[in-house]
C-alpha cells in the first residue's frame, strides 16, 4: 500500500505543466464557483452524474481536490492527509457520497517537496484551495458543518484511555453539547469513543490551521479515528452507515 501511494504521488508531482503565475482562487471566486461551477485553472474541471470536481494536476498553489454535489446536505467533508492517515480518504468519500454537498482533500503527501514557500501539509499550510473553498461555502451557508477526518496511532498516545481509543472527537479547546452528543452516538460503533477535552486530554492537530480561519463558531468537527477502526469502517458497511448517521445528528 505504501509503495502504491508513493508511486501515485510521484506521478502527480512530475511531468505536469507549470502554472506558477496563476493566482490562488479567492474566497469570492470560489463562492461564485459554487453558485455555478466552471473550469478554474490550474485545476482540471470534471463533471459527472451531477457532481462537479476540481482536480489538482500538480503541487502548484498547494494542490488540493474539490468535489461538489448540489443534492447533498449543507456540510463539508475535509480530508487533509489521505496518503499518511490510511483509509481516511475512502471514509471521507463515503460520508460525502451519503451526506454532504462538499468534499475537499489533499492531493499530495504532507511531506512532499514544496514548490513555493509553504508546506504541503494542509493542516499547517496558510493558504490553499482547500481552505478557501471551505470559507467560500460557509459564506453561503454560515451554519454548514465541517467534518474533518483524521487518523491517529494508539501507540503514540501516552494514557491508557488514549491507547485504547477508537474515536476522539473535538470542536476546539472546550467540550460542547454537539461534540458530547457525537461521542455518545459513536459508542454504538465502539465503546472507546471520547470527546476532547472532557473525557480525554490527548488530541492530534491542536495547532491545526483551521482554527485560525474565520469559520462560524462551533461548526468545525475534528474527528480522529484509530487505524484499526478505520479499517473496520471500510470493511463493514453497517459501521460506516452508523458513522454517517451519527454525523447527520450534529448537522
Image (cartoon, grey):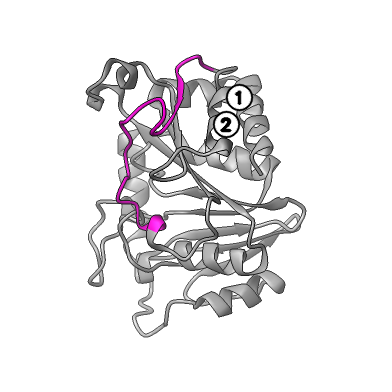
- 85 on left or right of 186: left
- What SS does tag 1 mark? helix
Specify start and end residues of the magenta stretch as a single range.
Answer: 190-211
Residue ID for mark 2: 182
Quarter of the figure that contains the N terminus: top left
Q: Residue at x 26, y 61 (%)?
A: 119
In the depicted view, which residue is nearer to us: 1 or 236? 236
Please tell me whether residue 54 is drawn above or below residue 27 in the rendered image: above
Q: Which mark is residue 70?
A: none
Q: Which mark is residue 185?
A: 1
Q: CA distance from mark 1 to mark 2?
A: 5 Å
| Quadrant in the picture for residue 163 | top left
Please tell me whether residue 8 is drawn above or below residue 128 in the rendered image: above
- Pinpoint residue 10: horizontal percent, then vertical percent: 31, 53
Q: Is residue 196 magenta?
A: yes
Q: Residue at x 51, y 16 (%)?
A: 190
Q: Residue at x 53, y 27 (%)?
A: 183
| Quadrant in the picture for residue 98 | top right
- 242 on left or right of 121: right
Amino acid at each position: 500500500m505504501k509503495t502504491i501511494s508513493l508511486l501515485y504521488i510521484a506521478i502527480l508531482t512530475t511531468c505536469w505543466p507549470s502554472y506558477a503565475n496563476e493566482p490562488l482562487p479567492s474566497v469570492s471566486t470560489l463562492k461564485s464557483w459554487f453558485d455555478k461551477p466552471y473550469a478554474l485553472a490550474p485545476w482540471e474541471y470534471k463533471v459527472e452524474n451531477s457532481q462537479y470536481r476540481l482536480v489538482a494536476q500538480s503541487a502548484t498553489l498547494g494542490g488540493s481536490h474539490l468535489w461538489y454535489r448540489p443534492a447533498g446536505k449543507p456540510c463539508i467533508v475535509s480530508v487533509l492527509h489521505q496518503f499518511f492517515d490510511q483509509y481516511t480518504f475512502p471514509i471521507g468519500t463515503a460520508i460525502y457520497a451519503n451526506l454532504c454537498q462538499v468534499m475537499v482533500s489533499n492531493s499530495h503527501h504532507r511531506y512532499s517537496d514544496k514548490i513555493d514557500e509553504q508546506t504541503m501539509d494542509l493542516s499547517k499550510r496558510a493558504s490553499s484551495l482547500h481552505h478557501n473553498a471551505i470559507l467560500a461555502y460557509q459564506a453561503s451557508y454560515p451554519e454548514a458543518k465541517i467534518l474533518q477526518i483524521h487518523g491517529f496511532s494508539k501507540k503514540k498516545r501516552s494514557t491508557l484511555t488514549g491507547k485504547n481509543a477508537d474515536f476522539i472527537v473535538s470542536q476546539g479547546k472546550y467540550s460542547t453539547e454537539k461534540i458530547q452528543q457525537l461521542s455518545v452516538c459513536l459508542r454504538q460503533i465502539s465503546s472507546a469513543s471520547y470527546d476532547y477535552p472532557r473525557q480525554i486530554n490527548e488530541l492530534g492537530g491542536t495547532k491545526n490551521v483551521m482554527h485560525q480561519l474565520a469559520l462560524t463558531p462551533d461548526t468545525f468537527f475534528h474527528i480522529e479515528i484509530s487505524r484499526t477502526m478505520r479499517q473496520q469502517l471500510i470493511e463493514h458497511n453497517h459501521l460506516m452507515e452508523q458513522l454517517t448517521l451519527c454525523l447527520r445528528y450534529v448537522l
